[in-house]
Image (cartoon, grey):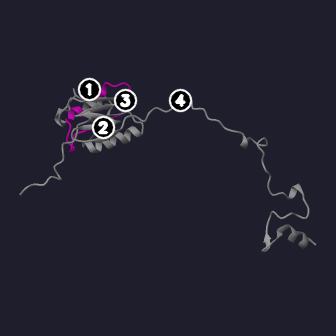
Amino acid sequence: MAAAVCSRFLLQKSSQGFLFSFRAAPAFSSPFLSRAYRLEPGDDDFYQRTSVSIMKKEADSGILIHSYGPAGFNVDGNRVFGPCALLPPAILQWNVGSHADITEESISLFHMLEPPIEILVLGTGSKLQRIHPSVLALLKRKGIAVEVQDTPNACATFNFLTSERRLVAAGLIPPSPSTALELNPS
């Protein structure tokens, strides 16, 4: 008799034959044989709505360099001609002509900032150039790390550090026009 009750519980007649089904009507009904319990919205805390209030929106991620060229830079849609100093949120013209013009006086605007910057990224043009040791020593005394690179890499480094929300500034000299693709008449 138990086999008959079991088969009636597990098998359901269909047009194609017998199907195994857990939804077949049982021979008897008992709340203890129920395999699941359906939660209603009032039954449990899981069904209560959660609300989130934004207390303070995050500040912008800072300024980013979108492009550069021999004439200057595109910084967040602002066209900057010639060398520039990026002191977020400010974009300034920087009065240097080449890497040799980067002196203690020309970098003074970077160590006078409040709050002080952590890292100064210097782009020296098309090629990596050496900066005078007295300039590097001054920045070290002020507690500012210096990253000296060619301008294309300096732009990428500045964008990366800005995206990490670091206190970073940049002094960039535009790269000179490339002559690598020009044909030499011979």
Residue at the extreme left: 186
State the CA–CA distance, disc 2 to disc 1: 24 Å
Residue plotted at (44% across, 33% down): 60
Residue 68 in the image: state x and y as whole percent: 27, 41
Q: Which image quarter: residue 16? A: bottom right
**Amino acid type, callout 4:** Lys
Label 1–label 4 contact, CB within 8 A: no
User: Disc 3 versus disc 2: distance between alpha carbons?
Assistant: 15 Å
Q: Residues within 10 Å of mark 3 (few under 14, many from 20)?
A: few
Q: Amino acid at mark 2?
A: Asn
Q: CA distance from mark 4 to mark 3?
A: 20 Å
CA–CA distance in space, label 3 to label 1: 18 Å
Looking at the image, residue 148 lies above or below residue 53: below
Please state which of residues 172 and 142 is positioned toward the viewer in this rendering: 172
Residue assigned mark 2: 74
Estimate the x, y position of residue 30 in percent, counting from the top left. Answer: 90, 57
Q: Which kind of residue does numbered mark 3 sit on? A: Pro
Label 3 sits on residue: 89
Q: Residue tagged by mark 4?
A: 56
